[in-house]
Image (cartoon, grey):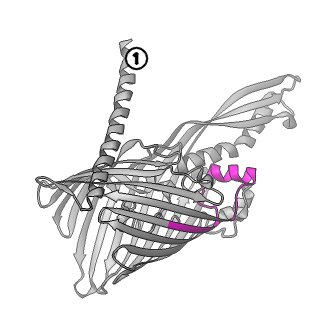
């Protein structure tokens, strides 16, 4: 009895602590917001800050962020608390706890978003260790900080929310620094290496690809079962039931970020490069029904193990930003080359242009237009058609209008409208299920509302 009681009690206490952490964060943030003052807690070089946000998303068709977006959903919230200490002038240590709910993702479980130490020996050389945020593009490191941008969502063609757990942070180390270039401005760099931990490979991008792979293997399973039992192919029926023991492992990744700030006030140009490898594995289950060579009906469950290795040959992003007075213009282009093991290699690409302008101290307006192609050599969607999907699964174009209202120093409101053409950024199984049901629309709209309080 004692042996079986321990894990139950441990699980109970873990969940209780997680709930307490979320609600304590909410209470602290709300008290800070209602005071109308920026109240960063400081005590002997210890700093505590945090945020909480609640969003609403609705679409005219398809899915955006959450499963039930076409009916309108409030399953879109985040709570974060950051603790940072500065033991010396050159050393900083910190940790951020985050709980988020995004449809089937997160479900408000608390986890460590980032944690580590940062020692800056000189302006031109510093080191970071721990779980550190990746500088992929100009805005990845600040993607959770609403006060840094006008839009609710960063352009999904470059900052895909379904890949957040892959792109946000790595566990390892990095070297960084700032180098003056005399009359040519200055140069910032960061070089990193480490590994990645995918907290939930059953949801979002990873879960969708596992599901699509399982569905795509129905025909080979049917052929294999028919050959084994000598069955007439027309008598073999196979239904995909799901997967189990999903694993996504990133043994090692390397990358670098380089930014040049020329002697033009407000202008910066940069590039990011990442290479690495990862492994995916799962067990697919199928319900098989057939009539064997002796005329006997057989119904059974069959399992198929899947595993594959992938090389990230190149994840490259080119970025530009220009800030002039109250206006900001930015553009980024990403090109990713993946060697998909048994499936061969392919290149995806995405790019966008963005403008925003702060019209007064409480109102900021912005817009951007983004384009994404999962296969850069198939802009017409012919490959999607070969997979049984509509051709507009081969692209996604997104025109976005955003507005932000700063209620006070600690609270903001945002509204964002999307007009979309294509569905390429929906995850694999969502695309397949929608295509089979005839429920994928090429042209569709989305509205997102969000409020954030922070201290």
Position of the C terminus, as image quadrant, is bottom left
Q: Is residue 378 above or below residue 299?
A: below
> Where residue 435 sits: x, y (%)?
72, 54
Residue 426 on the magenta segment: yes
**Nearer the observer, 172 or 1:** 1
Read off the magenta span: 416-443
Is residue 130 visible in this depiction of the protein? no
The residue located at (33%, 76%) in the rendering is 361
Badge 1: few (under 14), some or many (20 or more) residues near its Cα, within 10 Å?
few
Q: Is residue 176 above or below residue 23?
A: below
Position of the N terminus, as image quadrant, is top left
The residue located at (24%, 62%) in the rendering is 37
Where residue 405 sits, quadrant-wise, is: bottom left
Residue 291 lies left or right of residue 271; in this view the side is right
The residue located at (77%, 25%) in the rendering is 299
Q: Write down the residue under mark 1.
A: 4
């Amino acid at each position: 009895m004692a042996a079986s009681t321990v894990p139950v009690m441990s699980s109970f206490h873990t969940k209780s602590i997680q709930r307490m952490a979320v609600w304590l964060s909410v209470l602290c943030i709300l008290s800070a917001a209602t005071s109308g003052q920026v109240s960063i807690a400081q005590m002997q070089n210890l700093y505590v800050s945090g945020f909480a946000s609640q969003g609403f998303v609705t679409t005219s068709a398809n899915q955006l962020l959450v499963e039930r977006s076409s009916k309108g959903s409030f399953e879109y919230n985040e709570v974060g608390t950051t603790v940072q200490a500065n033991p010396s002038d050159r050393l900083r240590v910190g940790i951020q706890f985050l709980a988020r709910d995004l449809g089937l993702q997160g479900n408000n479980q608390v986890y460590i978003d980032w944690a580590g130490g940062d020692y800056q020996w000189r302006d031109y050389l510093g080191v970071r260790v721990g779980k550190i945020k990746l500088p992929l593009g100009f805005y990845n490191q600040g993607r959770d900080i609403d006060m840094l941008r006008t839009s609710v969502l960063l352009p999904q063609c470059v900052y895909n929310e379904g890949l957040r757990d892959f792109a946000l942070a790595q566990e390892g180390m990095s070297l960084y620094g700032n180098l003056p270039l005399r009359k040519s401005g200055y140069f910032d760099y960061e070089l990193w290496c480490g590994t990645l931990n995918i907290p939930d490979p059953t949801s979002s991008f990873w879960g969708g690809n596992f599901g699509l792979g399982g569905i795509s293997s129905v025909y080979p399973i049917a052929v294999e079962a028919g050959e084994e039992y000598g069955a007439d192919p027309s008598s073999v029926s196979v239904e995909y039931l799901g997967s189990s023991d999903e694993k996504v492992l990133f043994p090692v990744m390397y990358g670098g970020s380089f930014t040049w700030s020329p002697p033009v006030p407000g202008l910066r140009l940069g590039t990011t490069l990442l290479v690495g490898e990862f492994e995916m594995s799962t067990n697919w289950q199928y319900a098989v029904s057939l009539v064997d060579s002796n005329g006997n009906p057989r119904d059974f469950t069959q399992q198929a193990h899947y595993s594959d290795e992938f090389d990230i040959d190149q994840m490259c992003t080119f970025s530009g930003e220009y800030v002039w007075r109250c206006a900001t213009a930015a553009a980024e282009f990403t090109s990713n080359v993946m060697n998909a093991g048994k499936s061969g290699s392919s290149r995806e690409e995405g790019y966008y242009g963005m403008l925003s302008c702060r019209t007064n101290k409480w109102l900021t307006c912005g817009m951007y237009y983004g384009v994404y192609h999962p296969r850069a050599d198939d802009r017409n969607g012919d490959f999607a058609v070969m997979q049984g999907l509509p051709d507009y699964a081969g692209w996604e174009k997104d025109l976005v209008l955003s507005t932000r209202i700063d209620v006070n120093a600690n609270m903001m409101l945002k509204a964002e409208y999307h007009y979309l053409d294509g569905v390429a950024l929906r995850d694999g199984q969502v695309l397949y299920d929608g295509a089979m049901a005839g429920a994928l629309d090429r042209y569709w709209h989305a509205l997102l509302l969000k409020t954030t309080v922070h201290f």
